Image: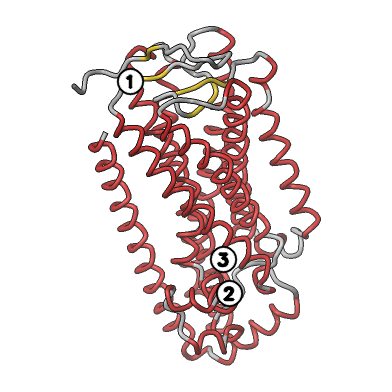
Amino acid sequence: ARGTPRATHKHTKAPHPFPTVDVPDHAHYTIGSVILAIGITGMVGNFLVIYAFSRSRSLRTPANMFIINLAITDLLMCVTQTPIFFTTSMNKRWIFGEKGCEIYAFCGALFGICSMITLTVIAVDRYFVITRPLTSIGVLSRKRAFFILVAAWVYSLGWSLPPFFGWSAYVPEGLLTSCTWDYMTFTPSVRAYTMLLFIFVFFLPLFIIIYCYVFIFRAIRTTNQSVCDVTVRDSVKSFHRLQNEWKMAKIALIVILLYVISWSPYSTVALTAFAGYADMLTPYMNSVPAVIAKASAIHNPIIYAITHPKYRIALAKYIPCLGVLLCVHPRDLRSTSSSFMSTRRSTVTSQTSDISSQFRRQSTGKSRLSSASDSESLLINNIFGCLFLYFHMVCFFMALL
């Protein structure tokens, strides 16, 4: 029968036996299979992002260090979570002991928080590049980007360590085949940690992201309105540069939205328990959002494979078989430098070369901008179509349970 799952303790020879949940075996196997698919996709995809952005000279910019860091956190999330979660699901219980539970949950918290902070940094970077284009040129060096990322890791570490020292705890969750911080216990200490965790690693970064994109939208709208009031030459030059930056901002926005959407069900469950309604939550209601949250690690490489032209060309150049899968035409590989403008901060020399080429194409600049805009709109529509399909898959997954 499919009644409400209940936790039962099964005594074994282990010194610290963990409880199990009375659910059908296929529930564990389904979750394990989904986690395995997510993990393999995330490992391969994020490794390719790191490889392409590190290998390609045009992608090795200070701002792209944030994208590489995001891929690193997602890769580490998959490496540390997938094998363990899959193994415990196949065994239908947690088998790695108390210390294993703590380390597993700590890794999930550290890499998850660092991903959110990195996305916030990316949004702030786009904010300065688009709203303050002149003052932001040359400000972000590799050294400064490195220190920003170190600060992001230290900040994430600061919120991941407290459960080791008695402020909340890392415990099994859901079907008791994975671990996370204790958000179910209704005590002042646990509730205080949960409240501050959500404020400083979810709601505050989310507020900063929203703030940045509100002003980015305003800057784009202002530019669109004023573009007719300047000369054709200045119009093409400034609008083309801003369009490139806006394209990167849109890609970042999609990645951020998917990340927030993936973690929202899990956040809702934790906040429900925080409000004192933990008894309303079933193991399924804890486990399924956790799986959806871990799926956030696969969004970044998929989005960049769909929307980022230089990333697609870099993959096709260094891994030719992927060029066929990504539908990269050979002529794009031969004319990379002339086909695409720089999408990040570049050196003064490359900027001068790009502007000169824009001047030579003034007469057709506006039509090309319109064409590029149409192509981007088509890409965005395809992405949201994939997102729609993604949520249907989630619903199907929940129905299987």
Please report contact status of discs 3 and 2: CB closer than 8 Å, yes or no. no
Q: Along the line of sight, which residue is nearer the eye, 303 or 119?
A: 303
Where is residue 179 drawn, in percent x and y? 51, 26
* Of callouts 1 and 3, the N-terminal one: 3
Circle 1: element type: loop
Mark sitting on residue 245: 3
Q: Quadrant of residue 141?
A: bottom right
382 sits to left or right of 62: left
Q: Which residue is mark 2?
A: 314
* Of callouts 2 and 1, the N-terminal one: 1
Q: Quadrant of residue 50?
A: bottom right
The answer to whether residue 305 is above or below residue 358 is above
* Of callouts 3 and 2, the N-terminal one: 3
Residue at the extreme right: 143
Q: Identify the residue at horizontal 29%, vertical 34% (top origin).
A: 26
Q: Identify the residue at horizontal 41%, vertical 72% (top origin).
A: 373
Q: Amino acid at mark 1?
A: Thr
The answer to whether residue 385 is above or below residue 155 is below
355 sits to left or right of 259: right
Disc nearest the viewer among 2 and 1: 1
Mark sitting on residue 282: 1
Please report contact status of discs 1 and 3: CB closer than 8 Å, yes or no. no
Q: CA distance from mark 2 to mark 1?
A: 46 Å
Where is residue 227 drawn, in percent x and y? 50, 72
Q: Amino acid at mark 2?
A: Ala
Residue at the extreme left: 1
Q: Amino acid at mark 3?
A: Glu
